[in-house]
Image (cartoon, grey):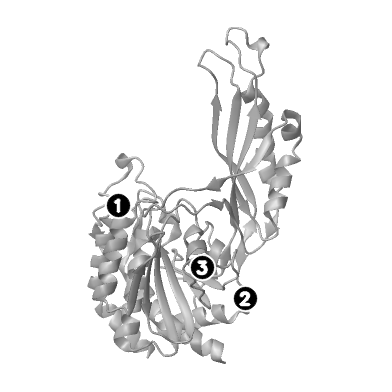
């Protein structure tokens, strides 16, 4: 069976590559994914999916099979922006293919995986691999803005609750079993404005913030963790202030923190660490976990707190065994088992809802968000084969 899957996957090399180039050609920043969703819908129809639907948030869900074992493959369809065009050696929306590598915005993160999971579903259909599985192939939205929001909606509102979910973010064809969580936090100080010619008449909110900035840097060095997922981190991503004019003392200052959560960190512990800093206490600063409430491309607002929990699948879990066995049966060797440095939709699937996750995706995450973003065509083919073979392997593992 595995040889047949791999052989058929190779036969679809040009098809999956063309599909990816089409996807890259459609800009799809967060909350503006409608065009690429419609292109995925057309491809799913051409691939013979049993059911295709676009939910009220704008996620696309394609079904193959109707068995009792429910498995989902997830790839977000949105991308970050292009940034400075001068840094690109190719048109970021052309999907340029050179020497077996496709370049462009979203090639690696993660339209390449999107193309491969859609074609993985096609192989399941063509080769009759459904067995006792129902496979859902999901193109999810707004992940770059708010990872996991889409799956909160899919689980809570679409009422899709798979036994297992494969997050297809780039793993360089390794099998991943988790990553650190994250939070977005603001620290805010207040001052009293006055004319800039006599600053002693006021209280400068920026000066109150200055020692907090230094304390945050020192806090990062003290944060702990565990060997596999790594230590927690905190960094200042943005600083801003307000004043009546550029000839006045600042009456407010705000820093935006990117806090990455180790396995032992919680929302409460991460907030408490910042609130207890001497500089934060001295300034009477406010510490706030941010909210996300941005309309999707279909106009739906689904608010959430910007706290995205850590998740880690145990080494002995049958889902991990099924993922590594699928790789071994297809390619004749054991895969690397690892974890992401960045965050994924797994924060909602497993972190919030406890549905077991693993990661497997084409492309190397080092190219994510870069002007050199790229993916090997060979990865698309191998990933396609893995996505087609995995549901059956998983179903067999849970039966035993």
Earlier in the chain: of badge 1 and badge 3, it is 1
Residue on which the image places disc 3: 155
* Residue placed under numbered mark 2 in the picture: 315
Front position among marks 3 and 2: 3
Tell me the crowding category of disc 3: few under 14, some 14 to 19, or many 20 or more residues within 10 angstroms, Cα based.
Answer: some
Judge by depth and name the residue closer to the eye, 184 or 171: 184
Question: Which image quarter holds the N terminus?
Answer: bottom left
**Which mark identifies residue 7?**
none
How crowded pointer 1 is (Cα within 10 Å; few <14, some 14-19, many 20+) is rated as: many
User: In what quadrant of the picture does the C terminus appear?
Assistant: bottom right
- Indicate whether 7 appears above or below 17: below
Location of residue 341 (image quadrant): bottom right
The one nearer the camera, 204 or 342, is 204
Q: Is residue 390 left or right of residue 124?
A: right
Q: Is residue 101 visible?
A: no
Left or right: 137 with respect to 230?
left
Q: In front: mark 2 or mark 1?
A: 1
Residue drawn at the location 60% of the way across and 70% of the way down: 354
- Residue designated by label 1: 27
Q: CA distance from mark 1 to mark 3?
A: 27 Å
């Amino acid at each position: 069976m595995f040889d047949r899957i791999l052989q058929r996957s190779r036969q679809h090399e040009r098809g999956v590559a063309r599909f990816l180039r089409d996807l890259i050609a459609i800009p799809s920043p967060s909350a503006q994914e409608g065009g690429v969703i419609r292109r995925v819908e057309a491809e799913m129809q051409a691939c013979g999916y049993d059911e295709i639907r676009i939910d009220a948030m704008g996620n696309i869900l394609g079904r193959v099979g109707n068995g009792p074992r429910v498995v989902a493959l997830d790839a977000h369809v949105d991308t970050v922006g292009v940034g400075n065009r001068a840094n690109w050696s190719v048109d970021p929306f052309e999907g340029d293919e050179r020497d077996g590598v496709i370049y462009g915005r979203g090639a690696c993160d993660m339209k390449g995986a999107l193309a491969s999971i859609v074609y993985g579903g096609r192989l399941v259909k063509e080769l009759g691999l459904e067995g006792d599985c129902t496979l859902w192939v999901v193109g999810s939205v707004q992940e770059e803005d708010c990872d996991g929001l889409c799956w909160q909606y899919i689980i809570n509102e679409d009422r899709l609750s798979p036994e297992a979910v494969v997050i297809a973010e780039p793993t360089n064809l390794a099998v991943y079993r988790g990553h650190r969580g994250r939070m977005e936090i603001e620290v805010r100080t207040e001052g009293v404005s006055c004319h800039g010619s006599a600053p002693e008449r006021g209280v400068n909110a920026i000066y109150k913030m200055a020692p907090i900035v230094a304390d945050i840097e020192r806090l990062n060095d003290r944060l702990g963790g565990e060997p596999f997922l790594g230590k927690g981190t905190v960094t200042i991503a943005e600083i801003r202030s307000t004043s009546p004019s550029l000839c006045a003392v600042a009456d407010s200052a705000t820093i935006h923190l990117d806090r990455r959560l180790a396995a032992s960190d919680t929302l409460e512990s991460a907030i408490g660490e910042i609130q207890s800093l001497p500089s934060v206490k001295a300034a009477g600063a406010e510490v706030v976990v941010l909210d996300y409430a941005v309309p999707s491309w279909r106009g739906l607002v689904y608010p959430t707190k910007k706290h995205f929990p850590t998740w880690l699948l145990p080494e002995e879990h049958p889902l991990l065994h099924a993922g590594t066995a699928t790789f071994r049966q297809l390619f004749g060797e054991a895969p690397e088992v690892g974890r992401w440095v960045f965050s994924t939709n797994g924060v909602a699937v497993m972190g919030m809802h406890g549905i077991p996750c693993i990661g497997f995706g084409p492309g190397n995450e080092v190219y994510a968000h870069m002007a050199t973003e790229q993916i090997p065509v060979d990865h698309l083919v191998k990933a396609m084969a893995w996505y087609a073979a995995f549901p059956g392997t998983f179903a067999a593992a849970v039966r035993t």
